[in-house]
Image (cartoon, rainbow, N blue to C red):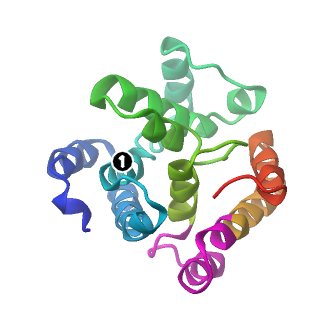
Amino acid sequence: MPIIQEPTTKAYLKLLRERLSDARLSHTVFTAEYLSSFAPDLGLNHGDAVVAALFHDFYRDCAPEAMLQDARQLRIPMSDCQLEEPLLLHGPLAAEWCRRELEISEAVYEAIYWHTTGRPGLGLLGQALYVADFAEPSRRFPEAEQARQLLRRENFRTALLFTTEIRHAVNQQKKVTDPNTEAFLLWLKTGGAA
């Protein structure tokens, strides 16, 4: 079902246009459309999938200092890696904002909160957003296309494991790495998830 058929989508898009760059807005819409295309096959609530995808990067364009300040003000616990790399706070901040302003479900909160790193025990909506954020159709790198093909030709679990392995490999090359990504990958490899 197209995202525009959700009753709140028009109001949400207006809000997002005021906050996000054109490129970021385009990414969130592509993520929402892509996630909503496979959410029914996973038994996910369409409305929850759309909200999670539209708002997952709500804080992504904020300055690092603003993220740290907002996280302190909202009393969001911060890890050492988030203090060193505040961009890692954009998911938790967006989740907390949505909880306060949109009255979202716990599944949506969790999905937005952990969409960048994943974590052991992440629910199905969070897993699906993790894949959709990585593989939405405007992503042109070869691994995104491969994840889309795995989802189409094999199954969700295969696409999720591939996406997590790629994200983990990329994270290992960064100056600051969040240990949740490695823990998420190990959890998946030992039978956790979908």
- Quadrant occupied by the N terminus: bottom left
**Residue under pointer 1:** 48
Tell me the crowding category of disc 1: few under 14, some 14 to 19, or many 20 or more residues within 10 angstroms, Cα based: many
Q: Is residue 94 above or below residue 154?
A: above
Q: Please name the residue shown 78% across and 54% down the image.
A: 185
158 and 83: which one is in front? Answer: 158
- From where the camera sits, is residue 62 visible? no
Tell me: residue 156, above or below residue 149.
above
* Residue 125 within the segment the image draws in magenta: no
Q: Nearer the viewer, residue 91 or 109?
A: 109
Give residue 29's quadrant in the image.
Answer: bottom left
- Which residue corresponds to the image point at 54% horizontal and 49% vertical from the top-left? 126
Relative to 29, say whether 143 is above or below: below
Q: How many marks?
A: 1
Magenta span contains residue 156:
yes
Residue in the picture at 84% in, 55% down: 190
Query: What range of the chain is rendered magenta?
Result: 135-160
54 sits left or right of 64 in the view: left
Q: Which amino acid type corresponds to the residue marked 1 in the rendered image?
A: Asp
The picture places residue 14, in percent across and down from the top left corner, at: 18, 47
Please identify the quarter of the rendering in which residue 99 is found: top left
Location of residue 159 in the rendering, given as x and y in whole percent from the top left corner: 64, 71
